[in-house]
Image (tube, coloured by chain):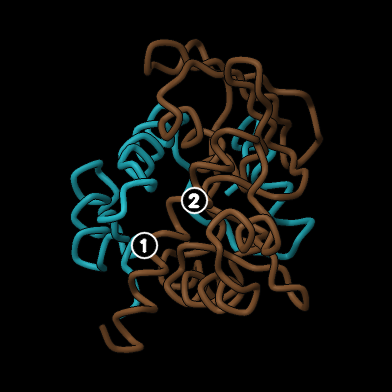
Amino acid sequence: MDAEQERIALDKVVRPYVYDYVMREGLPPTIAETSSALSRSPDEVRASFQRLADGHILVLQKGSGEVLMANPFSAVPTPFLVKAGDRYYYGNCIWDAMGIPAMLKQDAAIEASCGCCSTAMRLKITNGSLEGAHGIAHFAIPAAHWWDDIVFN
Amino acid sequence: MLLFWSEEHVEKWCKDWNLPRGEVIPLDKCFSLAQAWYSPDRREPEWRRRNIDEAEALFSELGFTSEFWRLPR
């Protein structure tokens, strides 16, 4: 296996590890946790995180290189709190918050608020259906520019 | 992508932020998009991100056909 193949093989282990961890724990793993769990050096994990970010699979925190987003999950609190089972998650946006129960394949309640006035808005997803939701979603940025500034988007 | 109480609240938000109005979609359509986009299991080693054609085909299948949903090539 050449170096490129080794990098691809590592990324195919790191990505499932990150997603398995965040789905189980509610937050993505750190570089140190991933390094320890996969018996790879922190530099190898950091480089893998960066390749996954370059591929628009992860978004990293500036400076530290830790995971900020493993879409649809956020590593930091957002206005989109999702409760599924006995676990809480944060979605990056309303699309991602609705994607969390789809990824978990579980019922969920989304505690969100109006982007304009912060009025509390609760959405419930049961058996794969959205129940009696009030409100609308606004996509401010055209799809062609979503990744220009994915954190704002 | 934010949640709003009503169209009026979107208009006010756009004015406050000095941003043009984007696409407003009903929550059931947003939910269909979220389900389709995130259902594939990203823990599977062979999972891969949709390419541009696949992503646009999914948008189109769900009724998102305007220029707004065109991805960069």
Which chain's residue wears label 2? A
Residue at (62, 48) in percent of width and height: A92
Residue position marked by numbered label 1 in the rendering: A12
Tell me which amino acid carries mark 1.
Lys
Q: Quadrant of the N terminus of chain A?
A: bottom left
Q: Quadrant of the C terminus of chain A?
A: bottom right
Left/right of residue A20 with respect to residue B67 in the rendered view: right
Residue position marked by numbered label 2 in the rendering: A17
**Residue A29, relative to residue A27: is it above or below?**
below
Residue B43's tag is: none
Tell me which amino acid carries mark 2.
Tyr
Marks 1/2 in contact by CB < 8 Å: the verdict is no
Q: Quadrant of residue B38?
A: top left
Asked if marks 1 and 2 fall on the same chain, the answer is yes
Q: Label 2: state its secondary structure.
A: helix
Residue at (67, 59) in percent of width and height: A68
Q: Earlier in the sequence, mark 1 or mark 2?
A: 1
Nearest to the observer: residue B5 or residue A76: A76
Residue A129 is situated, as x and y percent measured from the top left of the image, at 39, 16
Q: Residue furthest front?
A: A39
Residue at (53, 58) in percent of width and height: A38
**Residue A118, relative to residue B11: is it above or below?**
above
Q: Which chain is brown?
A: A
Q: Which chain is cyan?
A: B
Instruction: For marks 1 and 2, give the CA distance.
Output: 9 Å
Nearest to the observer: residue A4 or residue B66: A4
Residue B4 is situated, as x and y percent measured from the top left of the image, at 64, 35
Left/right of residue B26 with respect to residue A1 in the rendered view: right
Q: How many marks?
A: 2
